[in-house]
Every structure is written in structure tokens, then in C-alpha cells.
Amino acid sequence: MGRHTFFRWASVLLQASVLLQGSVLLQACAPRPVVTAFRLEGYPDQLATRVMPNLESAPLRELVVPPVWIPAGGQRLELLLDRARLPVFPGRWAVRVLLRPNRTVTLAVAGPAQALRQFDVLGRGPLRRLETVRGDGELPAFVRFDTASEPEPLFVILDVDAPVFLSRIEELPFPSPLSSTTPPASPTSAKPVNFAALALVGMPPPRSLKAGYRFGTSPRYAFLRRDAVEALRVAFRQVRKRWGREPLVMGDASQWNGERPATDRHLPRHISHQGGRDVDLGLPGTDGDSSLRHRCKLVLAPPDRATCEPDSVSGLDAPRLAYLLALLIEGPTPSGRFIAEGSKRPGPSAPVELIFADAAFIEAVRKALPELRKKKWIHDEALDALADDRVLRASPWHTDHVHIRFAGEPALVHDGLRDIRYSP
Ligand SMILES: [Zn+2]
């Protein structure tokens, strides 16, 4: 190994260990992973990592770095624009994926649930910071992003131990509510129907802290109607901007094909959550943790209702929760500015129909609202809408999250997503 090569790998190791520090604590009690890290030629500022979580033998600090990660001869595949699906055989591959401009793109890997060893995305330009979210590491796996007007191809690093398919599913871009283009009119109604807004799409992985959220479920179960995804993204970003605290947490929405989460495993969760109109969000915490965790003492009531014991709420950041709910109801304003007149605001991209939470959290939210209004962080509209149970309703089993139901039709599922199946 030449001196130059040595330093290159030394720097790779160093960066990999920095990247992994965050996960060291979490992994302390779990079997230690084997990690390999490498770079792709032409992508000098990005590092692909490979984590194999179930091998107990190798301690974390002994990073295994292959001297050449693409075997001589180049196991390089291409997903060109003339096809949407590429078979990938067992092994490690760098797949060059071509992209169309101005699309919402979902890359999906489908195959036997346990076949995936690595799924990383290396992009350039605006997609430079795109990362796949591991979730439970099982297939099918998804990553969703939007392309700009001149997208460069990206590389998908795929390591699988069984044959899989890599698919590229494309949707037209989400029309901005402020854009002047007219959406296509439906032949059966006078009101224009915005098909691009009705597509079922995955929540994109956050690309910076500014996004204001992280996944609390597998990206496989984080699909929503697109207008709802946009409503959440805008609200998460604004909450982060206003409060600057840790990211909020998105829990289960719908499965990639519009079904209830974990229907693929024959263990469907939730009663609703079908069709991409429902999402569970973690409760903002005062302790820097907004994951889906109980924020009160539970009481079980027959036959099977769990609610918060009176006066037992603790660690709930009620003002931040109230602000989030208000934003979802009112929609964004430029830079979060106060605009008294409702007609001068763009309104939400997807109207909220119902919000379910424990009665104890609802009480805390209602107490927090007047102060937010006084500060002119929210408008009269949210104050009014959240004042009674028209929208905000008490519900058992909502002791560790708040459930948002968006109004309107179920999302339209792209054939490319519908065709993806779970195989054990
Ligand atoms: Zn729910």
C-alpha cells in the first residue's frame, strides 16, 4: 500500500469513526456491527458505509476497509431512463441511476426481506446530502427525493445476498400553491383536480437539522398523500425554525402501497392509516427527546382502553405541540409571519380533518394556545379550531403520540409502488 493510499484510507477510517460515534452508545448493548466504509471515485466528499448489524464477532473499532471496493472489471450497473426496473444479482454493486429533471423520485429495492446488506445513495449537487434511512434494514426499502432542473446521475450502492430489483418510480412535481400553472381539470367536476397532489409518496429523508424531523418508523411505512407530506414538511421546518430544538419524530403513516403499516408482515398496526391520510407524530419533549414515548402515567380501563392518569403528564413540551398543530391547521405563512387576515394566507396544502390525542395532552395544548396567540405566532383560526372537539378529539391509546388525519380522498398509488411486494 503506497503512502498516498495509506493516508487516504486513514482519513476514511477517521471519518467513518466520527460518523459512527452517534451510534456507538445505542449499539452498546446490541451485537456489535461490522462496518466498512469507502468512497466512490468522483464523489470525494461522501462516504458510503456498510453496516452488518448481526455479527457479534467484530468489535466496532476494527473497521474492515476493502482496499478496492469495486472489483477489478467493475461490477457497475446502470438504470437508464428507458426502463424503470433493474434486476440485481447477489453481490456488491454500484448502480448508476439516471434521473429526469423536476420529478419526485422513489428508489425502491425489493426482494427477500433479509437479503439487504447495504443500500446507500451517493448524489451530487442538490442531492449530495441525500441519505438512505436504514429503518429495520429489511426489504422492501425505499428512498424518496426530488430532482432539480438538471439532475446529475446518482450512484446506488447495493449489497445483497439474493436477487433483488431496483426500481425507479417517478411522479410529476408537487405544484406550489403559489405557482401560476393551472392543474388539470377533472372531466366530471367543475373544480380542478390536482392529480400530482394526490399521489402516494414517501416522506423524504431529512437532509439537514433544519428539516426539523426524523423517522420514528421504517421509511417503508412513511408514505402519505403528497399534499399531506408537504404540509408536514413545512410545519416541521417552521417548528424547528421557531424553537430550534431537536427534530420532531414522524411515526407510522401508510405502507408504500397505501395499506396499513406492517400489513406486509401480516401484523397490521392501527385501525386506520390506510390510503395515506393518517400519520402518528411523536410528542415534543422538554427533555430533548420527541420520539414516540409515553408522556404520562397509564391507566388501563376495561375492556381495553389506555389513557393518561389525571395530572400525570410529564416531559411534554405543550407549547411546541400546540404550535405544531396550529401550523398544520393554518398552513404556512412566509417566514412564519403573522398575517391577521385569513384570506391573505396561502392556507395548508392539505386540510386537517381530525387530530386524536389523550385528553390530558389536549388540555395541555389548550392551555398553551393563548400565549402563542399573544406572541402572534399563531392566528385566530387555529385558536378557534382547537378550542373544542370539532378537530381535536380525545382518544384512548394516544398516550405516546398524536394522530393527524388529513381530509380528502385516499392517495393514488403508482403502479410501480403497487407492484412491490413483501417476500419473507
Ligand atoms: Zn395513528
Image (spheres, rainbow, N blue to C red):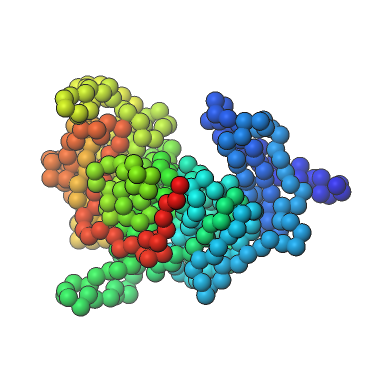
Q: Which quadrant of the figure has residue 70?
A: bottom right
**Whether residue 100 is visible:** yes
Q: Front-most of 317 and 39?
A: 39
Q: Residue at x 66, y 30 (%)?
A: 57
**On the picture, is 149 further left or further right than 373?**
right
Question: What residue is at 71 percent from the left and 34 percent from the top?
Answer: 62
Q: Is residue 234 left or right of residue 402?
A: right
Q: Position of residue 406 (x, y in %)?
A: 24, 52
**In the visual, does 118 lie left or right of 253?**
right
* In the displayed structure image, the side of residue 347 where residue 286 appears, left or right: right
Could you tell me if residue 327 is visible in this image? no
Q: Tell me residue 169's x, y (percent).
A: 44, 64
The percent position of residue 181, horizontal first and vertical second, equals 32, 75
Q: Nearer the viewer, residue 125 or 238?
A: 125
Q: Position of residue 139 (x, y in %)?
A: 48, 49
Taking the spot 58% from the left edge, 30% from the top edge, the residue there is 31
Q: Residue at x 72, y 52 (%)?
A: 69
View extreme (bottom): residue: 187
Q: Nearer the viewer, residue 358 or 336?
A: 358
Q: With respect to residue 410, does 298 lie above or below?
A: above
Return the residue nearer the eye: 81 or 323: 81
Please, which residue is most extreme toward the right here? Answer: 2
Q: Number of marks in the image?
A: 0
